[in-house]
Amino acid sequence: MRRRLTTLAVTALMAGGFVITAVPAQAATSGTQAVAAAGGVIICKPAELRQEAAKNKQAAQRARAAGKIEEARRLFAKADALLRRAKQCEDADSDA
């Protein structure tokens, strides 16, 4: 009985969390990308993405020097993701 209640409680929390997080995500747009609702066009700005990646790398290096290894790893990963997105934008522009 206790296990069943725990399972139901976890399931309800997960479902509620999904609804709460899914609704704002649909309406939100990133600062570096804008989606035009009418045409469905995605506008990428690779220069801004690369600039933000450089800022993250600098912050990661400062965090590593301060001994905050986990924060540095997170910031380096974010910088790498931004660089990959910039590369994807450039590749999409060259293919179009």
Image (cartoon, grey):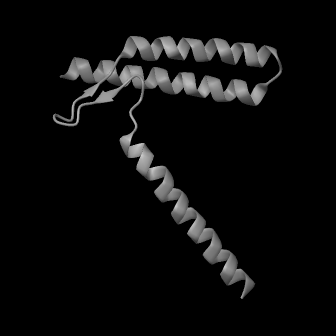
The quarter holding residue 89 reads top left
Q: Is residue 92 left or right of residue 33?
A: left
Q: Is residue 18 left or right of residue 68?
A: left
Relative image position of residue 35 (x, y in whole percent): 28, 32
- 55 is higher (above) or lower (below) than 18: above
Relative image position of residue 29 (x, y in whole percent): 38, 33
Which residue occupies the extreme bottom position in the image?
Answer: 1
In which quadrant of the rendered image does the N terminus lie?
A: bottom right
Pick whichever, 58 or 5, lies toward us: 5
- 48 is higher (above) or lower (below) than 10: above
Pick whichever, 38 or 47, lies toward us: 38
- Tell how many labels: 0
Q: Is residue 67 left or right of residue 20?
A: right
Question: Which residue is at a point 53% across and 17% down the rendered structure image?
Answer: 53
Relative image position of residue 7 (x, y in whole percent): 64, 76
Relative image position of residue 86 (x, y in whole percent): 40, 20
- 46 is higher (above) or lower (below) than 27: above
Q: Is residue 96 left or right of residue 50?
A: left
Question: Which residue is at a point 43% across and 44% down the rendered structure image?
Answer: 25
The quarter holding residue 40 reads top left
Question: Which residue is at a point 37% across and 42% down the rendered structure image?
Answer: 27
In which quadrant of the rendered image does the C terminus lie?
A: top left
Question: Which residue is at a point 50% across and 54% down the rendered structure image?
Answer: 20
- 27 is higher (above) or lower (below) than 84: below
